[in-house]
Amino acid sequence: MAHVRNYIQPAPRRLYAMLLMITSSTVISFGGLIIRNIETADTWQINFYRSIAFGLAIGLVLLFRYGKSTPTQFFGIGWFGVFAAFLLAFAGIAFLQAITNTTVAATLFTLSSIPFLTATLAWFFLTERIKKATFFAMIVAAFGILIMVVEGFAFGTAFGNLMAFLCALGFSGYATIIRKKRSVDMLPTFVVSSVIVMAIVATVSSGDIRIPIYDMLLCFALGGVVAGFSNALFIISSRHLLAAELTFFMLLEFSLGPIWVWIFINEIPTQWTILGGVIVMSAVLYNTFSELRRKKDRIL
């Protein structure tokens, strides 16, 4: 994933990047709705076909960027990249386990804690300092997640909530490795993670991966368009926006996802899920604006 620059880019480029991030977050927010419309495929089968489409989509991006030198990019990620790919594969599997065992809202609200989990892992493994505003926001977000976890035990969705947290942890671990190896283009890790997921599914499902064409098309849309297209736009945008700005626009995904399933299939989250989600999202917004204020003061 491209390194996010710490200085302000020219206005036209920044506006272009912001529009791309809005598009990216809006497109990827339909993921939960697509999964809800899959009729017979189980989570392992969805993972398999989603990974095929995702791997092919990112592979095309790599070919477009590097041409004949694409294979050398895979060797460039090293063992850190392979480990990052395993974390990404784990996160992808956990995501589908989460979203099929609890509400879309509970899953996405929990995933909005990724910036805080990443900050914690970066502090522990990379000795990056956690700012006071971030630490305060982390405490608030943890309280919001705790509300959703406790609510999950009461309504029988604890497993889904746990998987959502493990998914967030996997993505955060991946992001931490990317930060450590920021000089290396880790885009090939997406393709490697797709291969890992397909290998795991082939082992777990004993080769039973046949699904209806309708479900297969939805899985391809989920992996190729929703995940592949959105990640490509994110990579382009990350070159021209601050990390805090990227986090802010990512909140669109976590906000719109529950709205789509509410409008189209009448999936309504509980009051406790909404409360916990609002607390987590508020913490992320607070941390984002604090970071933007620091960047502005530094520039002035």
Image: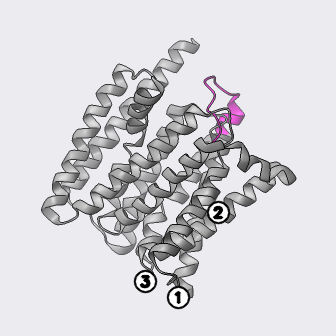
The magenta region covers: 1-15
Lateral position of residue 162 relative to residue 9, left or right: left
Residue 55 disc label: 2
Q: Secondary structure at mark 3?
A: loop
Whether the residues at callouts 3 and 1 have beta carbons within 8 Å, the answer is yes
Q: Is residue 184 above or below residue 73?
A: above
Q: Earlier in the sequence, mark 2 or mark 1?
A: 2
Asked if residue 9 is among those painted magenta in the image, a careful observer would answer yes
- Name the spot of residue 63 as percent of width and height, x first: 79, 56
Instruction: Quadrant for residue 119, please give it.
Output: top left
Residue farthest to the right? 68
Lateral position of residue 161 relative to residue 26, left or right: left
Q: What amino acid type should be assigned to the residue bearing mark 1? A: Pro
Residue at x 43% of width, y 37% of height: 118
Q: What amino acid type should be assigned to the residue bearing mark 3? A: Glu
The mark lying in front, picked from 2 and 1, is 2
Q: Quadrant of the N terminus?
A: top right
Q: Secondary structure at mark 1?
A: loop
Residue 39 disc label: 3
Q: Earlier in the sequence, mark 3 or mark 1?
A: 3
Q: Secondary structure at mark 2?
A: helix
